[in-house]
Image (tube, rainbow, N blue to C red):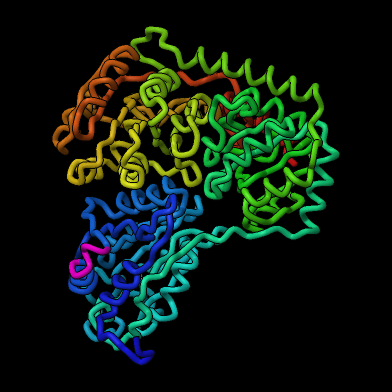
Amino acid sequence: MNAQDTIRLTMAQALVRYLAAQQTEIDGQRVPLFGGCFAIFGHGNVAGMGEALYTHRDALPTYRAHNEQGMTHAATAFARQTQRRRMMACTTSIGPGALNMVTAAGVAHANRLPVLLLPGDTFATRKPDPVLQQVEHYGAPSTTVNDAFAPVSRYFDRITRPEQLLASLPVAIDTLLDPADCGPVTLALPQDVQAEAWDFPASFFEPRMRRIRRPGLDEVELAAAIKTIEQAKKPLIIAGGGVLYAGASEQLGRFAEKHGVPVAETQAGKGSLRADHPNNVGSIGVTGGTAANTLAEDADVIIALGTRLQDFTTGSRALYMDHGPTLVGVNVARFDAVKHGGQSLIGDAAVALEALIGGLSDWQSDEAWQSRLAEERSAWLDIVARVTANDGSDYPADSQVLGAVNRAAGENGTVVCAAGGLPGELHKNYRSTGPGSYHVEYGFSAMGYELAGGLGAKMAAPERDVYVMVGDGSYMMLNSELATSVMLGRKLIVVLLDNRGYGCIHRLQGATVGVEFNNLFEGCDTVAAGAPAIDFAAHAKALGCEAEWVDGIAGLEAACERARDNDCTTVIALKTDPDKETAEGGAWWDVPVAEVSSREAVVERRAGYDQSKRRQR
């Protein structure tokens, strides 16, 4: 090809053609980097991006969604389920269509997950201003609603000339693939520029193999980390999402076994080790179990492996921080490795574990610590078995529902959930079967992620059985992508827990305020007849799903068997108790209680809050 060869394309055509040319390698197979593009067309993108996507629909499939936030959740889940090795794009019109994606961009940003956002924008020429859906800023005419994406994007650009793609697109892709700086990328696309043509270099569209870097280690940092760990008698590993994204589960298992180190898991890191691995002591933190939290209280060295150490993991810096263990932050991102005064070891988790295994030679933790590991683990597993068993209740606890789902999912299942009380119960009690089996969004804790996230997970791993657990509150917020799953033939098994309100915040309100107010329907301002009894099964059927109501855990287990035999998405709804939760485990969470109040219940709770605050580091 002549270096001067050019191809005349519109900006939108060039963008789509470039995306379709990006490739990666999965299990030795060359595959497209982008799994496709979700699109809801409007006047701001149908003539430009719509035409381009139609032209390249074989190389870059286009999927029609029903809600812009939902489709972006699905794209984010797709990236997570592929462990950030593949991703999707999302395009919208201007105005409300674009802004609907901002919440989902926050999810991707908080969870460090790659998704390419392509919202339409107002005219670069400004000739027809103000156009339909344009929000005018009197003193800043270049500002549009798409500027709202800047705080929740790792990279943001507005393409005001077609040739700007030559510089912006490579940076966008590099950001999406950067293990340390990964997250959502937003390219705002003015609708007139989408349709403008330019002579692009033909070489720009040549297929390109992409790979995720595995950053090496600084030898001085490595030597210091080895020295610190060698001095430990009671070490603990906290495994975060970085373990899964680095594909480091095998190395983590070898490290833990060889050196006798217990492994606790964050929400994002759950599944790093199988639940039946002898060194897996379960979940840590606010939603942690007694095994991990008890060991964390006594650990002398904590290895924070691929975790961003958010407050649920550290118990708002009061769980293990107060007794001052040495913290070794092993992370691909400097920002996370140095958190909380940690001793940093910056690099890929798999690379770091291999280096530590070699450098630590025959070192092991104390025998007494390893005995405690086994004892605490066994005691916690007994608790899990008890709280997830069917006790015959008409209105079961969330833990009992997830126990039934866990048994139904087996080795090939993936559980998907987000927000509310369910993630806490799942973190404590769900027994994962390794990477890909546990998919809970709790970095941003976005209600509405569940059903769309299940769709994205199924699109990423069609061979797995995807079980979505969702409360009635989240279902009511965002259920539209159920219809998309039916339309695309991506079967989900949805278990809908109806506790007549926002059960999780109801319980938190009880712990901090001491009353029920505006969370459960019974505590809301309603008409005399009360809030409507929502027939979730009938609603799901109207969206094209198979659906049924069941009573209790026995009814749920039978329905799960029927759902496995169905060909399409199936919704199983059951009534649950909003007040029941697993009492065992857990850690303090910093939720400030009113400092003054006329109510004695609040005064008492504030005293307890002040007492707990004294433990914070």
Furthest toward the top, the residue is 392
Is 589 covered by the magenta stretch?
Answer: no
Does 373 appear above or below 356?
above
Q: Position of residue 602 (x, y in %)?
A: 58, 28
| Nearer to the camera, 391 or 589 | 391
Apparent side of residue 367 relative to residue 60 in the rendered image (left or right): right
Q: Position of residue 506 (x, y in %)?
A: 44, 28
Which quadrant, please, contains the C terminus?
A: top right
Which quadrant, please, contains the N terminus?
A: bottom left
Apparent side of residue 419 relative to residue 123 in the rendered image (left or right): right
Q: Position of residue 384 (x, y in %)?
A: 53, 18
* Residue interval drawn in magenta: 54-59
Query: How many numbered marks, from 0 up?
Result: 0
Q: For residue 19, what is the image quadrant?
A: bottom left
Residue 535 appears in the figure: no
Is 56 covered by the magenta stretch?
Answer: yes
| Nearer to the camera, 295 or 66 | 295
